Amino acid sequence: REFEKAIAGLRAQANLPPGWDLERLLGDGTSDKMYGLIPVESGDKIALFQQLLDETRRSKVTRDRKEALAGHFEVTRVQEVQNFDTYQSYLKRREVVAKSCQGSSPPDAPIGDDQWTSWSGPVLTHPTAQKITRAFKLDELHAQSNEFLFFHGTKPTVEASIAEKNFDISYASKQGLFGAGLYFAEACTKSDEYVQCNSDQEYPLLLVRVTIGKPYYLSNDKPWEDPGRRQMEDSCKNGTYHSVLGDRIKCRGTYREFIVYDNDQAYPHFIVWYKRK
């Protein structure tokens, strides 16, 4: 009983999701890191990720795609990331962003429907993302900081490292379209352009909780020239913005990208493994 009380106290103090298995994370006390990569066993829960991929699939192809776009993505398995330290860092940063957004008049969050319409529509992941957070008893997505679930494509072995150690902004390319940031997509077919498969022909997509706060909206064709990569980075690190929203739907008819320049604004929640069909 005392152990259960201690677990409940830790969960409340650290604001941890109700769905996390803290006993499993604590383990036998031999490790100082509270981290777990938990296989999702429920078929109903896995079906939500299949729904998410189906709903966010688009037929658009960009120059970043090295292989033909598959006709269908079939989810084979899902792993949930439970990482105490990374989540604590994320929550602290989210609180800072939320205070900044709510300190403006009018507030910068939540972004209204009319604004999203002018920015090429509502976020594709949002309806099913809300179902996923409820099914796994996670925190509801935080409207006061403009928080969403987005995709990030990667390759096998790297996804496990990100899950355990979080994203490392130092690896971000300074020559990226929107500068040296962490890039996320609302469409699975955009993130699919950057994945590699394992020996079982499974591809990994990270489903990431991202705080975009007040986004620097850009729809011009060459953002690396105007406003320029360093300007985009600086406006989010030292300015009044917290992220960049690159609307390539408007200028190229392809995809929107969401970029943050602080790794604590992203928490990798799930690894979604799928096969191209």
Image (tube, rainbow, N blue to C red):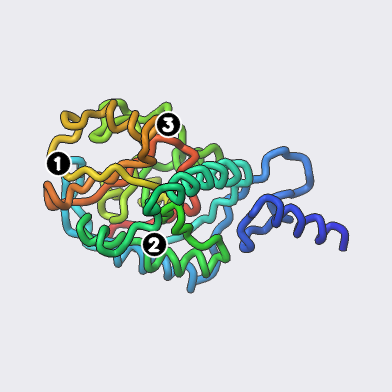
Q: Secondary structure at mark 2?
A: strand
Q: Quadrant of the C terminus?
A: bottom left
Front residue of 175/224: it is: 224
Q: Amino acid at mark 3?
A: Ile
Of the residues tagged 1 and 2, which is closer to the observer? Answer: 1
The residue indicated by pointer 3 is: 169
Three-letter amino acid code of the residue under disc 2: Val
- Residue 187 position, x and y percent, is 28, 56
> Which corner quadrant of the image does residue 122 belong to?
bottom left
Residue named by callout 1: 220
Label 1 amino acid?
Asn
Return the residue nearer the eye: 202 or 204: 204
Spatial separation of the CA atoms under disc 2 and disc 3: 28 Å
User: Which residue is at 46% across, 39% downward?
Assistant: 157
Q: Is residue 275 left or right of residue 141?
A: left
Q: Earlier in the sequence, mark 2 or mark 3?
A: 2
Please tell me which residue is depicted at 33% across the width and 33% down the height of the picture.
235
Q: In the displayed structure, does residue 63 sit left or right of residue 94?
A: left
- Which sits in the foreground, 201 or 267? 267
Q: Nearer the viewer, mark 2 or mark 3?
A: 3
Lateral position of residue 83 relative to residue 124, left or right = right
Q: Which residue is mark 2?
A: 75
Going from N to C along the chain, the mark reached first, 1 or 3, is 3
